[in-house]
């Protein structure tokens, strides 16, 4: 069973097949990145899907890591309600747009997020990196997807478009190696209805690898930035909380 179209669309995959296969692919890519960093899924006892939506990825990841207790949180109460009703073997929680999360410190061996930090402005991002560090156990891993240079080029060239951002924001040169660019969504009643629980500093965020490596280290050790590692679109930042 898949969520209704309105919930799938909020995850960027309105088609049922696209939604299912994209979730399966992302889970496999996350597990592969974890293994490449020297941590097997068999070593994970607890995992948090930060920004889980209606559970597109977590059920697939749980199949790959059956020994891990799986939790998901999201600002979208409707998505969480659907997940609770249809994925009862996992823990689902409504969270807020700003920290803190409703979990104790050092609760998780692994935190991952798909398409969350790719939408936050600089202040929410900074706050959430600190909060993810708080809920990670010492030595725990974080796999966090972002829009990188290739994604920005797709918008800059007009091959990918959104009606929710000012077009002139992309009429410029390429993202340089140390740059972070945030383009807020143009808010309206329609957009607000499609983004339940989301605050004002939300839009499209683009991260060059150099920016991530220099700025995120205040909270997490950045092990690698894997370009286009999530469904061929988003980069994946592989992080560890210092032991």
Image: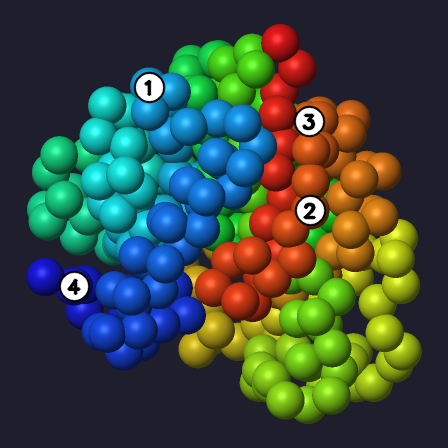
Front residue of 86 and 203: 86
Q: Nearer the viewer, residue 25 or 116?
A: 25
Residue that label 3 marks: 220
Residues at marks 4 and 1, CA–CA distance in whole angstroms: 27 Å
Give the CA distance from mark 4 to mark 2: 31 Å
Q: Are marks 1 and 2 in contact (CB under 8 Å)?
A: no
Residue at 66% over, 15% down: 242
The tag on residue 185 is none
Element class at badge 2: strand
> In the figure, is residue 37 to the left or right of 85?
right
Indicate which disc, 4 or 2, sits on the residue closer to the N terminus.
Answer: 4
Q: Is residue 35 something that shows in the picture? A: yes
Q: Disc 1 or disc 3, which is closer to the eye?
A: 1
Residue 186: image quadrant is bottom right
User: Percent from the top left, x then y, of residue 3?
Assistant: 19, 63
In this image, 141 relative to 102: left or right? right
Q: Is residue 238 above or below residue 115?
A: above
Q: Upstream in the sequence, badge 3 or badge 2?
A: 3
Looking at the rendered structure, the secondary structure element under dot 4 is: loop
Upstream in the sequence, badge 4 or badge 1?
4
Badge 4, how many Cα within 10 Å: few under 14, some, many 20+?
some
Q: What is the number of the mark on residue 2?
A: 4
Kindly identify which residue carries mark 1: 45
The residue under the point 66% across, 57% down is: 227
Q: Pick whichever of labels 1 and 2 is earlier in the sequence.
A: 1
Asked if the residue at tag 3 contacts the one at tag 1, i.e. Cβ–Cβ closer than 8 Å, the answer is no
* Front residue of this view, candidates 118 and 149: 149
Q: Are marks 3 and 2 in contact (CB under 8 Å)?
A: no
Q: Residue at x 63, y 89 (%)?
A: 159
Q: Nearer the viewer, mark 4 or mark 1?
A: 1
Residue 161 x, y percent position in the rendering: 60, 85
């Amino acid at each position: 069973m898949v969520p209704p179209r309105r919930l799938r669309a909020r995850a960027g995959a309105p088609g049922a097949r696209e939604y299912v296969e994209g979730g399966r692919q992302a889970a496999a890519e996350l597990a592969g990145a974890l293994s490449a960093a020297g941590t097997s899924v068999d070593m994970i006892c607890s995992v948090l899907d930060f920004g889980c939506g209606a559970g597109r990825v977590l059920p697939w990841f749980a199949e790959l890591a059956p020994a891990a207790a799986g939790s998901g949180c999201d600002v979208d109460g409707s998505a969480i309600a659907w997940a609770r009703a249809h994925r009862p073997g996992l823990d689902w929680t409504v969270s807020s747009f700003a920290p803190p999360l409703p979990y104790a410190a050092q609760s998780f061996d692994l935190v991952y997020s798909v398409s969350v930090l790719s939408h936050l402005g600089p202040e929410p991002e900074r706050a959430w990196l600190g909060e993810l560090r708080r809920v990670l156990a010492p030595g725990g891993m974080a796999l966090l997807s972002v829009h990188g240079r290739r994604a920005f080029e797709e918008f800059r060239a007009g091959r990918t478009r959104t009606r929710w951002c000012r077009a002139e924001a992309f009429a410029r040169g390429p993202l340089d190696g140390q740059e972070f660019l945030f383009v807020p969504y143009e808010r309206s009643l329609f957009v607000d209805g499609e983004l339940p629980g989301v605050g004002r500093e939300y839009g499209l965020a683009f991260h060059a690898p150099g920016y991530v490596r220099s700025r995120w280290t205040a909270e997490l050790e950045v092990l690698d930035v894997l370009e286009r590692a999530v469904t061929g679109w988003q980069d994946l930042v592989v992080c560890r909380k210092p032991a």
